[in-house]
Amino acid sequence: MFEARGLKKSYGALAVVRGVSLSVAAGERHGIIGPNGAGKTTFFNLLSGEAAADAGEVCMDGINLGKSPPDARARAGLGRSFQHNSLFAGLTVAENLAIAIAQRKKLYKIFWRGFLSRTEVFAEALDRAHRLGLGAQAHTRAAHLSHGAMRQLEIGLTLALRPKVLLLDEPTSGMSPEETAAIKNLIRRLPEELALLVIEHDMDVIFDLASHITVLDYGEVLMRGAPAEVRASPAVRARYLGMG
Amino acid sequence: MVFLIQLLNGLQLAALLFLLSVGLSVVFGLMRFINLAHGTLFMFGAYLGVACAAAFDSFWAAFFLAPLLVAAGGAALYGILLRHIRRKSPMQQVLVTFGLIFIGFDVARMVWGRFPYSIAEPAVFAGGVQIFGQVYPAYRLFLIALGIAVMAALYLGLEKTRIGAMVRAGVDNRRMAAALGINVERVFFFVFCLGCGLAGLAGVAAAPVFPVFPGMDMPILILALIVVVVGGPGSLKGAMFGSLLVGLADTFGQVVFPEFAAATIYALMAAVLMVRPTGLFPAATVH
Amino acid sequence: MLKTVTRAPDVRDPLAAALVAAAAMAWLFTGDFGKEVLSEVAVFAIFAMSLDLLVGCAGLVSLGHAAFFALGAYAVAAFGVFVNLPMWMAMPLAVAVTAVAAAAAGFFAVRLGGVFFIMMTLAIGQMVYAFFLNSRAFNADDGMAGIGRVDFSFLALDSGEPAVFSAFAVCAAVAVFLLLRMVARSPFGHTLAALRRNEPRLRSLGCPVLRCKLAAFTLAGALAGFAGALAAQHNGFISPDLAFWTVSGEVLVMVIVGGMGSLSGAALGAALVILLRHHLAGLTEFWVFYLGVLFVLMVLFAEGGVAGMLSRLPRKLHRRGGNV
Ligand SMILES: Nc1ncnc2c1ncn2[C@@H]1O[C@H](COP(=O)(O)OP(=O)(O)OP(=O)(O)O)[C@@H](O)[C@H]1O
Ligand SMILES: [Mg+2]
């Protein structure tokens, strides 16, 4: 249902992504691992349209997304979270979520009625805050949250879009073990039919969650397979697991 | 023949625009900082040139002194004000320099009044030169030569010297340059002062050709901004090609469509930006 | 603006109420000159509030907003003088023309980020200025006189009277304030505010940011055109100077000095700058200098402008009162 073919991207002389293909079926949980600087985040940027690919294409439900910008891809059902939190820092948790929900409902077209009168949006925002484990901080400004809570909100914003394809870039980076467990739970409870691509450095998380794993190295696919195969692969062990 | 004369006029405007825009462009490439008061420095270059020319009774004294004075003024401006707004948002930085335009405009009125001045061109270039059977003012040819000379000097400086390498590294990737131990802030200061000096040079060089009056800065600032946008910020090549394009388009635009002279430039800019939103030769990746 | 989401909506705007009250007092207790100034303040309040939608709400700084002010003025003059339409028809047509022009200019401007957008707006402003400066139809730099005013004879009122026109201008300003406040409080307005805070994230959440920015640019341009149409009637005269960069600069000063993002702050800024100009103009020839200094100081040290200072005042007084 979601497919990338031969994606390439260079920054100046530096080839960061060198022909990566990947396809994810509905309901699949696909992990991406690779050493620092392997081009994982850049690969996500190519998928979500944040960066323009030099070559290759991205298709969703058989439709080529071509050069469509990130907002069009998001409206088509592609949601992504960022490795470095990208929040509306001056707004509270609930307001952050309400903005995301409003985008999903395309409320930006409405300029004659008050936003605050859309009680269903704010009810959903509060509900989502609770489900993210941020219920107590629903009225705290995003800028004042702890790092872990910010990560949760970062993911929560993307989930508020109800994406069909979800890209998570290192959802548990910098989190405590408890927070990591909470995120794992959150990911487990995602809708069945959702296609998930997740970049992770935490091997426990990835081997636990993923049904398939792709190993990226120097912008290329080093290996792809079931978690057990990847774990057993000498090449991966040497290049990556051994290091971590 | 008219065509050739217009071509020379266009090149002369391009030379001035290059002097003005190159500082603007490289400073932007280095620090994401656009100094809208750059035109004001151009105006002060012209006024200080007028003052020096009167004081020393020599064009050449003005020609060499005025840019130095403007560069010193730029250094002072940086030390007093701009250094402290480096951490403010880009919007605030632009707004502060916009406020400086107002201040500079009225300071010029206070000191020199509202009536135009000019400098006599130096005796060497006072006459005309026979080109293709036409007489063309020698001073304008000198302006073209000046533009080319500065361009060559900047090219060599940027490509062959250590500080040039630092500037290029800084434009390319500021964080990386800082990580490599380059004092980006000092490089920026140097480039900023150099840019101010070049704006002053453009001002004094323009003074024999353009009337010197309060408000002379705005039309040329707009053209210089268009050069930066069209050429792509941060690169010498961008400033060069942008200046050529804008200088020629403006000059020929006035001949071909006098009623819509101004519009030709904006049409050019709009067309370039439609095709390449970051200009023709962007050195700096714009985020 | 967005601060209030999910908390009790702040329907009171004491500053706006105070401004309306001050306008009413001025209207009641000043002579014809005072009422002329009141009209001018009302016109510039509309102009400044329209810019505040861009700057304060959406975070789009325009240095060429006077382009649309001038377009509105020229359009109303063209419809009124050349076509001989009554002002009641010329005004909406002028606003429509300005809206179309703003949409066309915005089409180019909004896809440019940050500083590029600012430079593009500066260029747009200068382009319009140069256009009117060279247009023979509008008498180039001499401008045009003899522009009429809206006709209130059906109410047995003469709009040539400062009392009538200033009341009309103030009502127009209040209407524009209410319209813009409605927009700012709508989902669209909150989306613009989110765009100001983090455009890349908003885009990745599926918001068509270019279209939203274009809509804001068009609305702001149209309302600036409305202000221009009123200014042309108030002065009875138009000239290319309406589009000059100092006008764009001055209206931005109003927004920044008054306090951006609250609409009523922009209106306050308009009143302050115009009153200050009338006072300083008598004292010094170099009014622009002081305007520049004030502007730089406000940008550097008072982000919320005067409105921001006023809103912090009660809390400060309260704290001091509590200590005693
Ligand atoms: N916009 C850019 N301009 C220039 N170089 C870039 C850009 N984005 C990424 N790079 C370079 O591309 C390489 C890959 O970066 P990327 O962020 O994709 O790696 P990653 O696999 O996500 O690493 P990490 O595990 O540290 O997040 C790095 O060397 C980085 O410096
Ligand atoms: Mg990464």
Image (spheres, coloured by chain):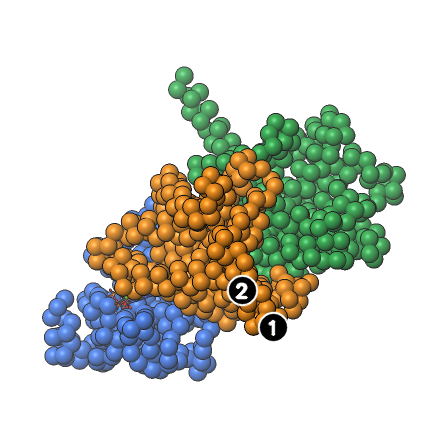
Q: Amino acid at mark 2?
A: Val
Name the residue tied to disc 1.
Answer: B1
Q: Secondary structure at mark 2?
A: strand
Judge from the rendering whether residue B272 lies leftward or rightward of residue A82; answer left or right.
right
Please say whether residue C40 is visible from this viewpoint.
yes
C18 relative to A34, above or below: above
Q: Which chain is green?
A: C
Q: Position of residue C175 (x, y in %)?
A: 68, 44
- Taking depth in this image into account, of B204 and C173 the one nearest to the observer is B204
Could you tell me which residue is drawn at 48 percent across and 28 percent down?
A: C313
Residue type marked 1: Met
Tell me residue C199's x, y (percent).
45, 58
Quarter occupied by the N terminus of chain A: bottom left
Chain B: colour as depicted: orange
Residue at x 22%, y 67% (from the top left corner): A36
Chain of the residue under label 1? B
Q: Which mark is residue C273?
A: none
Q: Mark 2 — residue?
A: B129
- Cα distance between the residues tagged 1 and 2: 14 Å
Q: Quadrant of residue C122?
A: bottom right
